[in-house]
Image (cartoon, grey):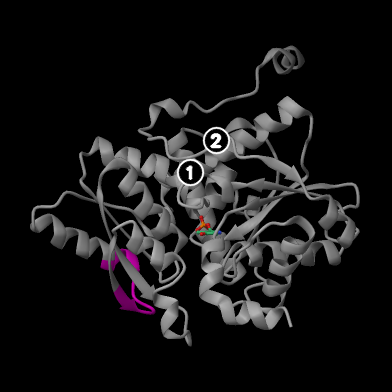
Amino acid sequence: MAETATLTQAPARIDFGRFPRTNLCHRPTPIEAMPRLTELLGGPRLFIKRDDCTGLATGGNKTRKLEFLVGEAMREKADMLVTQGAVQSNHVRQTAAAACKVGMKCHVLLERRVPGRDASYETTGNVLLDDLFGATHEFRPAGLDMNAEAEAVAEALRAEGHRPYFIPGGGSNPTGALGYANCAQEIAEYTSETGQAFDWLVMATGSTGTQAGLVAGFQTIGHDLPVMGVSVRQPRERQMSAVHGLTQKTLEKLGAEGVPLSRILVDDGYVGEGYGIPAESTMEAIRLLARQEGILLDPVYSAKGMAGLIGMVRQGFFKPTDNVLFLHTGGAVALFAYQDQLIASMT
Ligand SMILES: *Cc1c(COP(=O)(O)O)cnc(C)c1O
């Protein structure tokens, strides 16, 4: 009986149509082989899912989340998006662009989270594009509860007659994480359409919505691809419990059963000195991907994630026959805010 049921059952699909959503994203994003990086490292077969090509304002992972967040903002008849991030936040840039696309205003709080940067850090890269998209911004010193700060600002704006919709940092709440549950489904569909299966999925993890959404998505459709998050900021235990918390809330929103903490995999060996401070391995990852594959990584997130993948290959973490998929989460706009380090790393 049970065997028959398994054979005749179509793969489970999530009905995303029951959630408000607006179209911002090029989907599905391509999956490409990385033969020259694979050969150089002499390890498992490496692939990359190009979420740097989501199509909104140079792309990146926040676009998938914003489809559901902005969808909800539109349903609430908001006229303004309010969010927060670090100075060189990719999330803020994509939110500012999304606001333009749907005809809303955008106001953001930028946290001076990274110490020791020169003045241009606050005008170039993502900040330049935030300004181009007409977002207004105000700065905050490091270490505040930035979501609380941004919610307070949203309340003040509401009192002035605006209709703000608050988006937490990184778009990481159960609504935003739906974007990555959708990405999990996309990866499973790619495998069933092409026959190319993967043994591991690796990516950078920060505000947690990407990893939580992926784990929740795979759990909901019954696909057991392990998801390894490479921390860009927090120590392992803290990141695991934060990712797990959002995974459970996202599963609840999807109407699916929860997962044990042991399903959340995090490596914190590639943070270096801290958030937004590239380590030696970060700069090496940027150089290798550029020169082996013609792909741009960023110094805050995706290159730390890739440094993790490279490190795991070198340590023999994967089997030589494994197929390993790296999720490129975008961010290359920030390269211009790290010009000095980039130049130094090439000499
Ligand atoms: C935000 C971001 C991440 C991290 O995703 P989270 O959902 O915040 O964990 C990774 N890469 C880039 C380029 C990002 O901008």
Front position in the image: 246 or 343: 343
Judged from the image, the secondary structure of the residue bearing numbered disc 1 is helix
Which residue lies under the disc numbered 2? 27
Q: Which residue corresponds to the image point at 30% horizontal and 41% vertical from the top-left? A: 102
Judged from the image, the secondary structure of the residue bearing numbered disc 2 is loop
Along the polypeptide, which appears first: circle 2 or circle 1? 2
Front position in the image: 304 or 241: 304
Mark 2, other Cα within 10 Å: few <14 / some 14–19 / many ≥20: some
Q: Position of residue 20 (x, y in %)?
A: 35, 33
Is there any visible trace of residue 269 in the rendered image?
no
Range of the magenta residues? 139-149
| Three-letter residue code for mark 2 | Arg
Q: Position of residue 16 (x, y in %)?
A: 46, 29
Asked whether the beta carbons under mark 2 and mark 1 sit within 8 Å of each other, the answer is yes
Which residue lies under the disc numbered 1? 64
The image quadrant that residue 237 belongs to is bottom right
Q: Position of residue 65 (x, y in %)?
A: 45, 46
